[in-house]
Amino acid sequence: MSSAELAELSDKLMLSTVVLYIVAMVAYAADLGFRRRPAAAETGADAEAEVKAQVKAEAKVLVGAGAGGDAQAAAETAACEPAAEATAGAEQDETAGNRVEWARLAVVLNVLGWGAHLGVLVTRAAAAGRWPWANMYEFLTAIAFAAVTAFLIVMWRFRARFLGAFVMLAAVVALGIANIWLYNSVGPVVPALNSYWIAIHVTAAIVATGAFTVAGASTILYMLKSRQEARGKAGEGVWARIPATDVLDRMAFRVTTFAFPIWTAAIIMGAIWADEAWGRYWGWDPKEIWSFVTWIGYAAYLHARATAGWKGRRAAILSLVAFAALLFNFFGVNYMFSGLHSYA
């Protein structure tokens, strides 16, 4: 295929990706909104099993008491109980079946969208003959891909399907911005970007940003869930299906712990690349400053948790401040300031 055909294929795959992500987002939202409350294994209590055991025990007592005048009534009660249990079990199985269908639909569409998204990057790279993140359109597309990839890993590792609707929303918004306002046709890059460092430095920044996005979604959910708990409404509606705040807190911490060393490596490798390209390691360029501010924010978050024992709301606020710096580093710096990174 020619470069023009590959570029056209990349654009068509982008459309498919957005459509699949939108439908997956709706399916995740439906799964979150309509499925049953967390199972006993998730809540730490097996109330339903206890009730069934108690009912069976009472039935045995009634049958054993059948020697008295109420023996026939007791036997009828014991005989009718299995039918009632079967009916209740059928209703629960039906509910569970609906839940599994929504969940499966969401995951399948998510994976298909992820595959199409990967195709966008691969065909774009083949059309351009370079790494596909040399401008804002490509960079944001790659960050959305990294965020979805990070979510799929977290969902598989921690069973965090509840994050699906929120991560898909972020991915759809990012791809919408990339296609509506940031789109660039396939073309060559400026000489400064024509380096093997783009495959190392920029890739590390993309991976870290994608992971930070998942951690940010978990932290935002933590803040919202804790607010509902303070109001005594954490067990109502959708919030009853969101895990407890300590689960969200730990998840955000684990993902941030993974992403922070990668972000650190990205800054160090960026300094080495800057020395090769511009003859200095650090020049207080706006992008360099805000990358470092973001690093300070996440370092403060991790340090506060490790040494001062910060958890919960205080740690979440630090995490959100760092995430806000990350977003400003991407969107604000590139359009509000001029510097050596302006070509991006």
Image: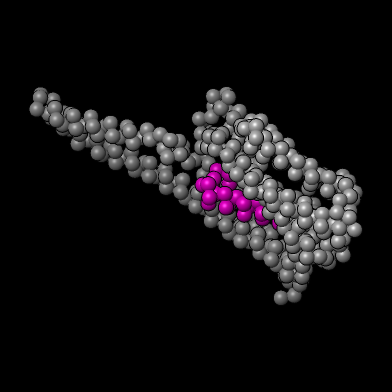
Residue 160 lies, in percent from the top left, at 54, 45
* Residue at the (45%, 46%) spot, across then down: 98
Q: Nearer the viewer, residue 26 or 241?
A: 241
Residue 219 shows in the view = yes
Residue 243 % position (x, y): 53, 37
Q: Which residue is drawn at 78% across and 62% down?
A: 197
Instruction: Left or right? Give the position of 262 relative to 289.
Output: left
Instruction: Name the residue furthest front.
Output: 307
Please count the marks in the image: 0
**Is there any visible trace of residue 316 in the rendered image?**
no
Res 75 quadrant in image: top left
Q: What stretch is highlighted in magenta?
A: 141-167
**As drawn, is 138 to the left or to the right of 158?**
right
Look at the picture and state if 119 lies above or below 205: below
In the visual, does 251 lie left or right of 270? Answer: left
Q: Residue at x 77, y 70 (%)?
A: 129
Is residue 2 magenta-colored? no
Q: In this view, does 239 lie to the left or right of 332?
A: left
Report the quarter where the N terminus lies. Answer: bottom right
Q: Position of residue 49 (x, y in %)?
A: 33, 36
Q: Where's the C terminus, which quadrant? A: bottom right
Q: In the image, what residue occupies the spot 53% across and 56% down?
A: 108
Vertically, is 278 above or below 247? below
Query: Does the magenta-highlighted stretch encompass residue 149?
Result: yes
Where is residue 82 shown, x and y percent of the image? 24, 39
The secondary structure making up most of the magenta span is helix
